[in-house]
Amino acid sequence: KWKGEGTTQNLESIVIGRCYDYIRIVNPSVGEKNCSQIWEAFKNAFINKDPCSILPEDYELFINLTFHTIPPNKSLFWENNQLLVNSFADRGRRYMSLGDTLFGFVGDFLNWCGQADSPGLDYESCPTTTECENNAVESFWRMLSIIYAKHSSGVIHVLLNGSAAGGAYPQPGFFADYEIPNLQKDKISQIVIWVVDDIEGPDIDSCGAHSVKTLETRLTALGYDVTCTDNDKSAPAAQRGPISSDRGGSWNKLMFVSFAGFLFRF
Ligand code: NMN
């Protein structure tokens, strides 16, 4: 009955399994967490409720149970670049994007919703954000984006896609609407923006132009020290690797970004 995809099959096993994977293998430094309790808190945010009346606050207990600090200088915000960010952040070893926190990790790439007056999950369909914005998945990511931004500190990185059709800095977007307003200015020393085009993709947006300019202006007006770097302007071609590599475009992009990260650190 809804237009969106239904709940991911085996949701409970995936959430509990990912939770154990995270605390035992991916990042044991977060300490002991109760993964079955975390699943209960996650589920109780949306089961037995109208699937269009789920609010970010409904995930408060889930956040309390999964919360851990985000190391300074490790936050990585992004738009239209999720797979690149996943590889580049390297499960928190290089950067800790929201998907590399325990709270983001358990829900990444999953879909879920409940139904009013029934304790069951809806595996057939779930509301999209156009149908109703207060749906279980949207409110989950809103809550997490707010928490993630509030706890980010030091040098903040933002990885944008200069080839994105709607512009590198989309509005509305989670970064524009839930993350920027929740950054804590007194904890942030600098904001570094990277605009990376798809290999052989169109160069639609760059530093100082279009939507990236809008972003730079907004952050500067908020009083941040802002730097912006384009891939095509600063990286020597050799560092980006051959264009027709059998590893595919995202590898080249990754090589660039690794190189950019290297430049920024030293
Ligand atoms: O889904 P979009 O609008 O591209 O959101 C990306 C931004 O919002 C990132 O800065 C990220 O921190 C946050 N976010 C992340 C996820 C995820 O990791 N799956 C989902 C929604 C929002």
Image (tube, grey):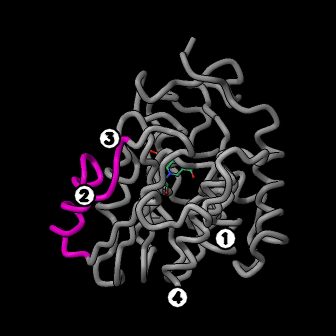
Q: Is mark 1 within 8 Å of ligand 1?
A: no
Q: Is mark 4 within 8 Å of ligand 1?
A: no
Q: Residue furthest top?
A: 1
Q: Tell me the amino acid under the disc marked 2.
A: Gly
Residue ID for mark 2: 208
Q: Residue at x 44, y 53 (%)?
A: 160
Number of the label disc, if any, that sits on residue 266: 4
Q: CA distance from mark 2 to mark 3?
A: 20 Å
Q: Which of the two discs, 4 and 2, labels the residue nearer the N terminus?
A: 2
Mark nearest the camera among 1 and 4 is: 4
Residue 87 in the figure: left or right of residue 168: right
Number of the label disc, if any, that sits on residue 16: none
Residue ID for mark 1: 92
* Residue count near mark 2 (Cα–Cα under 10 Å), binned few <14, some 14–19, many ≥20: some
Q: CA distance from mark 3 to mark 4?
A: 35 Å
Mark 2 element type? loop
Q: Nearer the viewer, residue 29 or 247?
A: 247
Mark 3 element type? loop
